[in-house]
Image (tube, grey):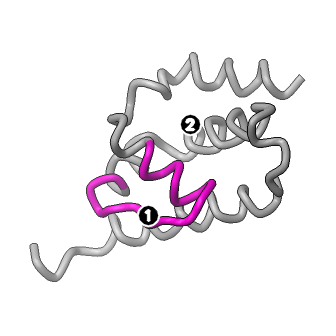
Amino acid sequence: MATKENDQIINDNNCETKMGLPCVLEAFTSIFETGTISNKCCGELVGLGKVCHSALVKRTLENPLFKDLSAARIIAKSIQTWNNCLALIDSPSPSA
């Protein structure tokens, strides 16, 4: 079952310890609700790594609280958030 697989990935990679709670909430809001993610939290998200990011999003989708959400839409938003953060982190900031 997918849940065990995601839990295993999350445990093996210590995914739940790699981001601070404020950034976890920001990332969650930008993916599962409507909101933006700050540059600081984008840095934490990219530091988390794509494997952890995907596993955490998939595990959240398996929670009964989120059963009414469109999984395809959430996955698309998670990829979009990831790609936006990656582009932001990879490009030098003009204010740096």
Horizontally, is 50 left or right of 61 in the view?
left
> Could you tell me which residue is drawn at 80 percent across and 32 percent down?
64
Instruction: Determine which residue is flagged by label 1.
Output: 86
Q: Which residues are magenta?
A: 25-41
> Could you tell me which residue is drawn at 37 percent across and 57 percent down?
42
**Which amino acid type is shown beneath numbered disc 1?**
Leu
> Could you tell me which residue is drawn at 60 percent across and 59 percent down?
33
Quadrant of the rendering where the C terminus is positioned: bottom left
Residue 16: % across, % down: 47, 26
Crowd rating for badge 2 (residues with CA inside 10 Å; few <14, some 14–19, many 20+) = many
Q: In the image, is residue 70 part of the stretch drawn in magenta?
A: no
Question: Within the image, what quadrant is residue 12 found in?
Answer: top right
Q: Which mark is residue 59?
A: none
Instruction: Determine which residue is flagged by label 2.
Output: 52
Horizontally, is 89 left or right of 24 in the view?
left
Q: Judge by depth and name the residue closer to the eye, 56 or 48.
A: 56
Question: Within the image, what quadrant is residue 4 found in?
Answer: top right
Query: Callout 2: helix, strand or loop?
Result: helix
77 above or below 47?
below
